[in-house]
Amino acid sequence: MRGRCFLHIAQLIINASSGAKEHRMPKKGLYANIHAKRKRIAAGSGEKMRKVGSKGAPTAKAFKKSAKTAKKK
């Protein structure tokens, strides 16, 4: 057990010194977030969708950008 712990610490030090970045999962897209929120609302979370033009609501520019990267079915 002690040897595995030491190896783990050594690997962390090597990664930190070499500047290796962690592999992160890509963020979900705009449409995935909207669908997730609609699902939570349907389940009775008490949340509400933001009105068009309100602070924090997706802009027309955000929708155009997400349409470019949308997966084709």
Image: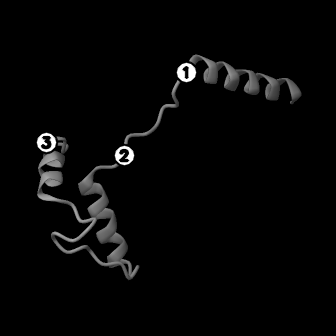
The residue sitting at 24% across, 65% down in the picture is 57
Residue 58 x/y as whole percent: 21, 61
Label disc, if present, on residue 19 of the rendered structure? 1
Name the mark nearer the viewer: 3 or 1. Answer: 1
For mark 3, what is the residue? 68
Total number of numbered labels?
3
The answer to whether 59 is drawn above or below residue 49 in the figure is above
| Residue type at tag 3 | Lys
The residue sitting at 68% across, 26% down in the picture is 12
The residue sitting at 18% across, 52% down in the picture is 62
| Residue type at tag 2 | Lys
The answer to whether 23 is drawn above or below residue 14 in the figure is below
Callout 2: SS: loop
The answer to whether 2 is drawn above or below residue 47 in the figure is above
Residue 51 x/y as whole percent: 19, 75
For mark 2, what is the residue? 27
Q: Nearer the viewer, residue 12 or 34?
A: 12
The residue sitting at 16% across, 59% down in the picture is 59
Q: Nearer the viewer, residue 24 or 51?
A: 51
Residue 37 x/y as whole percent: 33, 68
Residue 61 x/y as whole percent: 13, 52
Q: Are marks 2 and 1 in contact (CB under 8 Å)?
A: no
For the C terminus, the quadrant is top left
Quarter-of-image position of residue 34: bottom left
| Residue type at tag 1 | Gly
Quarter-of-image position of residue 43: bottom left
| Sequence-earlier tag: 3 or 2 | 2
| Sequence-earlier tag: 3 or 1 | 1
Check disc 3: other Cα within 10 Å, few if <14, some if 14-19, many if 20+.
few
Callout 3: SS: helix
Image side of residue 37 versus residue 19, left or right: left
